[in-house]
Every structure is written in structure tokens, then in C-alpha cells.
Amino acid sequence: MKCYYIITTSSFFISSIFLVLVKSELFTALVDLEKLLYTEGEIVRTLEKYLEFEEQRLEKVKWLSREYEKLHNVASKDVETFLSNPVNAYLLVKRLTADWKTAENLIDGSHSRAIIENITRQEDLKFPDEEDLSGAASALMRLQDTYLLDTSTLARGEIQGTSPSAELSAGDCFELGRQAYNDQDFYHTLLWMQESLDRLEDEEIKTSTKPTILEYMAYSTYMLGNLRHALKLTKELISIDPTHPRALGNLRYYQDAVSKEEDFKRGDDGDASNELQTFSRPKESTSTEKDIYESLCRGERTMSLKEESKLYCQYVTNNNSYLLLQPVKEEVLFLRPRIVVYHGILSDNEMEVIKQLAQPRLARATVQNSKSGELEIASYRISKSAWLKDNHHKVIARVSRRIKEITGLETNTAEELQVVNYGIGGHYEPHYDFARKEEKNAFKSLGTGNRIATWINYMSDVDAGGATVFPEIGVSVKPIKGSAGFWYNLFRSGDGDFATRHAACPVLAGSKWVSNKWIHEHGQEFRRPCGLSPNE
């Protein structure tokens, strides 16, 4: 009689499954029993390998648990301060996406799987998805570019206006590089893969692997035009992992590309420098709108003393009985177009009411398609918004009336109050609030004409970044809690004032809440009559 025993160690140890063939008459002779000692020895070695594997697996699970606990303990002390640092915000999203997937893969067995499923199926628990991770990574790199942040400093969580965050691990940096690679942003891929490589050397528990990092770096280097450096990185990869599935093919490809390069110097073995400084951030020119916009965000551009001397502050009543006993503090930031800031417009209580009303209604902010007039989401506007009507709460009606009395414009035909909260690196690239002549369908559904003016309430202080900037005229408006900005978008002729093109700078540190009131043409016929000059 023959009996077959299958000994399995783990689903991770498929290769360790082996078949033991024994005969029931082995017990009849000692010489045969001696052979069983060899079998027993193999079992001991197999179980030792299994235990070693399990210990390594559990050590990784313990490390992940410690990382979760560390982040949670720091966040729990002061949630607002914690999330004001964008590195912390990115880490939080990554821990609940990429790292959570790693944790799920490490946990094996039906009983353990039930624990995971019990967590993920709870309706009151929210888990971010891949789009959230991609957005958080893109936001961090947007901040890096706009505010010229050094990669290593950013990886240490050292950002102006914030408390330092936990440092990024090699795996955290690798994920940033991978997200950049998926977006075909090879410049940032190189920056973050190099940082991942540098940090990997100092890690006891490796959160990434050198061959994988080198493969990403080689291809990104190749895409940026440095063939010899791509070739060198690939050779280094093969020296570490000769059996890498793609490295040999890539090596031949890069070698062929190098040989065809017209300016390849004879005798040069491709020993290019490892320094990433050989690659610079791609730029079209030094005077593009984006460059001006970003320099304004950094506070680098200022007015001349002659221009500043013409600006002033004053108390305003507009001869309005509503304002006679409590004049408004008006600060003029620019004369033409006239851009002003009104201070002390909203009380803390009013701002809290508006935020509370908006929170359950918040949804991804949209922009209007210039051709179809339809609303759609766009990568150049990252925030969430909600719309509040005057009849939602007496505070909303009170704010609308206040805007009417200060500006002297009719608000019955204005749009509802739009409340906006900016997330990680939240921004809105340069745009016009008014519709251009070619945008025939803009605001057609409202039936109230074009946006004649913009009013924006700043409902939070922002620790760093988040200014409203006007690239055409070089003006920057810093968010101050309780203040409001105001400007006309149209000349008295009804033509758009292109100098009012503006943008919301990325929020570098802190949380930014604003609420917008767009005032339309209809109803203003006697409040702001047409002028005789097109540019009046």
C-alpha cells in the first residue's frame, strides 16, 4: 500500500510544497527507518525556512503598524496643524492607499483576511483611492515647483510656516517618483527616485528596492535626452540583478541609441556624472505668464516706490445709511483696474456658519467649457466648492446685503455664494472671471448677462502661499481672515478688462477657505451706467 503526504508551508511557499512517498512496510527493517531521518531533517529545514519567512513577514507588518501608529499619534495632538503640512497630508493618503495594499498582501489566511474585510466594509470609514494618491503626489510636486522647494528639504517635511512632518521613507519618495513617471513627468521622476535611492541606504527595513529605482531612473534619464547616463544606470542595475527581466533588453536598446547619437564622442565610455543637476526643470522662457504667476506666489515681485506712493487706505460709507455708523476699511491695492481689499467684513461667527453650511455640500470645483458652456472638472483648478442661497440661512442673506451696500451693486441677480475649500496644494491657475466674446454660451442659463464684478471673502488665514495674484499687473492679495477683495471685470462699455486675469496660488501651508460672489450685469443699469468711452 502506498500513502502520499503533501506538506504545505504557506501560500507564499508554493515552491516548498513537496511530495513524500513512503511504504507501509518501512517499520519492518531498521535500515529503512534510518532513511526516514533524512526526511525528518528536510522537514526541519523546511519549517525553519517557513518560520524565517513568517518572521520577516510579521516584522514588516509590525513596522507598518508602528508607522500607522506614529502618524496617528502625531495627527491626534492637533489635526489642523498636522494637515497644514502638505507632506503630512500626502503621507496620510499614501498610508491609506499604497501602504494599505501592502498590508493586505502581507496578511494571509482566511481568519486574517476576515479582519481586513471587516475594516474595509465599514460604511463610516473612508479610504482614498488611486486618484487621491495621484492628486496628492501631483500637489506636492506643484508646491515644489511653485515655491522652489529643495527635494531633500521637502522629504524632511521642513516647509515654511508649518511644524516639521515625519520624514519621508525611501518608499514614500519612490511613490512620488512613480506617480510623476505615470504622468510622464520625467524631471520629477528623477528628483524623487534619486532621493529614494539616497534614503534607501540608511534604512534597516527596506521600503523600496535599488534595482526598481534604477530602472525608473534609467528610462527617465533616457527620455530627458541623456543616453549615456541611462546606459550607465542600466549597467549598474545589471551588476546588482543580472536576471532582471527587462534590464538586458534595455541595455541593448540604450547601446544602440548611444551609437546613433550624432554628438557621441569617440572613446567616451558613457561614464556620465551621477549628479541630477545635469537635468534642469524644463522651461519655455523666462517671461511666460506661468513664471510671473509663480514669482508673485513667492512674493518676489513688488511694485516700484512710485507706484506704491499712489496707493492709499480710507474709510468708506458711499453715503449709505447702512455704513454711516460703521464705515468700511478700504485698502486700494491697484488703481487701474481698481483692486481693493475691505478689512473686517465677516465676523468669526459668520464665517463658521458659512463653513458649516458648506461642508456637507462640498464637491469637486468645476470650470465652464468655453465652447459648450458645460461645467467640467479640470487639473488647473484643485478645490472643492458648495453653493449657498440667501434663503439657506440668515447669515448668507446678511452677507449678500452687506456686499450690496458696500459695492453699490444689485446682488439679486448675482450668483449664489460659492464657498471654496482648497486641499493639498490647492490652486486655480490664471483665468478670467468674465466670459469673452467668443464664449457665446457662458452664463446663458442664468440669463443675467456677464460677470460685471468679483467679490471674494477670505475666511481663513493661510500660513504660507494661497495668495490671489494678478500676473498682468503684478498685484498679490494675501488672504487675511475676515477680509474681502473686490474688482470690476468689465469696463463700463461691457467689454472685458483683460488686466483682471488672476489666479489662486497653491496653498503651501495651512487651510484656505474663501467664498465668492459674482455680480452680473442685469440690475446694474442705474447703479453703474454705461460709459461714453470703451475703456471707461
Image (cartoon, grey):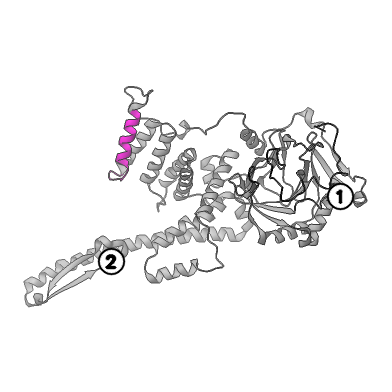
Which mark is drawn over residue 405?
1
| Quarter residue 125 falls in | bottom right
Does residue 257 appear in this view?
yes
Q: What residue type is labelled 2?
A: Thr
Left/right placement of residue 288 relative to residue 356 reads: left
Q: Which amino acid does label 1 sit on?
A: Glu
**In the rendered view, would you say 528 is above or below 125?**
above
Q: Position of residue 362 (x, y in %)?
A: 65, 57
Q: Where is residue 83 in the image (x, y as percent from the top left)?
A: 60, 54
Depth check: give the residue in front, 185 or 459.
185
Q: Does the magenta stretch include residue 244?
A: yes
**In the rendered view, would you say 110 is above or below 67?**
below
Does residue 270 appear in this view?
no
Depth check: give the residue in front, 268 or 503.
503
Left/right placement of residue 428 relative to residue 399 reads: left
* Residue depicted at x 11% and y 68%: 35
Q: What stretch is highlighted in magenta?
A: 241-258
Q: Is mark 1 on a helix, strand or loop?
A: helix
Left/right placement of residue 438 relative to residue 51 reads: right
* Residue depicted at x 52% and y 48%: 137
Depth check: give the residue in front, 1 or 51.
1
Q: Is mark 2 on a helix, strand or loop?
A: loop
Q: Which residue corresponds to mark 2?
A: 9
Q: Is residue 91 magenta?
A: no
